[in-house]
Amino acid sequence: MMKSLATLTFSAAVAASLSTSLTSTAQEKTQKPNIVLFFIDDLGWADIGANGSPFHETPNIDKLAQGGVNFTHSYSANPVCSPTRAALMTGKAPQRVGITQWVHQPSHIHLKSEEVTIAESLQKHGYVTGYIGKWHIGEKDDQMPSAQGFSWMKAVNRAGQPASYYFPYNNKRKGAFWDVPDLGDGKKGDYLTDSLTDFAIEFIDANKGKDKPFYLNFAHYAVHTPIQPPKDLVEKYKAKRKKMYGDTKTPKNRDRYGTHTRERQDHVAYAAMMENLDMNVGRVVDHLEKNNLLENTIIIFTSDNGGHCHLKKPGISSNRPLRSGKGWTYEGGIRVPHIVYWKGKLTPSESKVPAITMDHFPTLLDVAGLPLEADHHLDGKSLKPALLGEKNAGLAERFIAWTYPHNHGSGHRPSHAIRKDGWKLIKFESGLKYELYNLLEDAGESNNLAFQNAQKVAELDTLLMNWIKETTPKTPIFK
């Protein structure tokens, strides 16, 4: 069967513009695509307009989705941040690198220096590498991004979340460990998400027009707690909430282990933070376009876990129609936005191919025309065929899985999960053991089919347990 014209155009463009040779000419080097990866903190799948948010306003993010490939069945490697961040850097399942829980910093747990990161791989092929914002997989100097392949680093604090979103971005009660560095020359009224974007523009300006492509990992602290919005947007969302819902109380739903989920998006402060985040994504994209860089820059927009909605009292956002949120292996805790945009190179589309955090490493190498490094990104697969609209490479048929063997402040108790062929099995270690869902018919995970499908449960359970065994080191990495 002949490929579509769009596919041929993309393939030809990639083949013509990229070189894998380390001794290529300066002209060839400039043709390797730049990469900007937005890695947002606690952003739920349904938090953006492109995925159906009824309350948040995200026109710039939506524009990327409409002009690129929107992976609507994409997942974080874990329902909390640190394991997913380790998976992004290494292309490995979190348990392989010994990080299966968010790191309670300060801690001896960190991403080991012997792990080869995506930044180190790109650096080897001539990329200038930069990191902005949240890291949360190490807090000592030799554990920070600057020790893991990033030659330029800004505003990376040691605690994993900011003490404040307002200048001077600190909190005396928490101590300097929580402060966000590199922002001491700011002024009263400055807002953290805006200030981080200033750094992104600085990095782009410092590297435009050079003979080396750049990779910027832009890890916003937003929209993680503390929920502190830019004050000029609060009244707008108070009025919007009033118009949409009147004076009604936020509905909640009782869920597993006596917890509750927020059932609608109506949190005024959170919505204001979302709009500000979106505006700042737009600032970066506009700056790339203004400097004639957009057509040679791959933009990825994604998140580290699902939205914060599930607590003993309702959380901050709602992931509906998905169930639950951050800290859980239900869809709301692990399904995340995932958009890939490359102006003029990708046919705008929506992809239902299941994807997971570990896939970013090999995908970026592949799309940039660089050799894959299967010995490093062991658990990721290149999504290039899905970006091209091709149905091959076993992407749709493979299984993806999770292990989260910890309690979480959201009320979660240890669980593990697997998705294959549209089926999803969740295995809990306490209470009702198995929950089985047909995600193609029940994305909200409301109808547990485990009792009627013992054979499917057994099949998926075997795959899941074997995967956990194969990917978990026999000797603990951290003791």
Image (spheres, grey):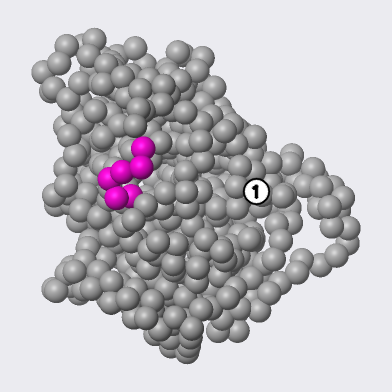
Position of residue 266 in the picture relative to residue 170 (left or right): right
User: Which SS type dominates the magenta stretch?
Assistant: loop
Position of residue 336 in the picture relative to residue 209 (left or right): right
Q: Give the x, y percent position of residue 78.
A: 39, 62
Amino acid tagged 1: Gly
Residue 466 magenta-highlighted: no
Say which of 161 and 80 sits in front.
80
Identify whether 15 is placed above or below 184.
above
SS class of the residue under badge 1? loop
Mark yes or no: residue 190 visible.
no
Q: Residue at x 68, y 46 (%)?
A: 56
Position of residue 243 in the picture relative to residue 188 (left or right): right
Q: Residue at x 44, y 52 (%)?
A: 74
In this view, the residue farthest toward the left is: 23
Quadrant assignment, res 104: bottom left
Identify whether 241 is placed above or below 38.
below
Magenta span of residues: 390-395
Mark yes or no: residue 340 visible.
yes
Q: In which quarter of the image is the C terminus?
A: bottom left
Q: Which residue is drawn at 15% across and 16% down?
A: 24
Identify whether 45 is placed above or below 447.
above
Say which of 329 and 304 sits in front.
329
In this view, the residue farthest toward the bottom is: 431
Q: Give the x, y percent position of residue 93.
A: 28, 60
Q: Quadrant of the N terminus?
A: top left
Q: Give the x, y percent position of residue 365.
A: 25, 35
Say which of 375 and 214 sits in front.
375
Q: Which residue is drawn at 28% across and 77% down?
A: 462
In this view, the residue farthest toward the front is: 1
Residue linked to disc 1: 52
Q: Give the x, y percent position of residue 386.
A: 38, 40
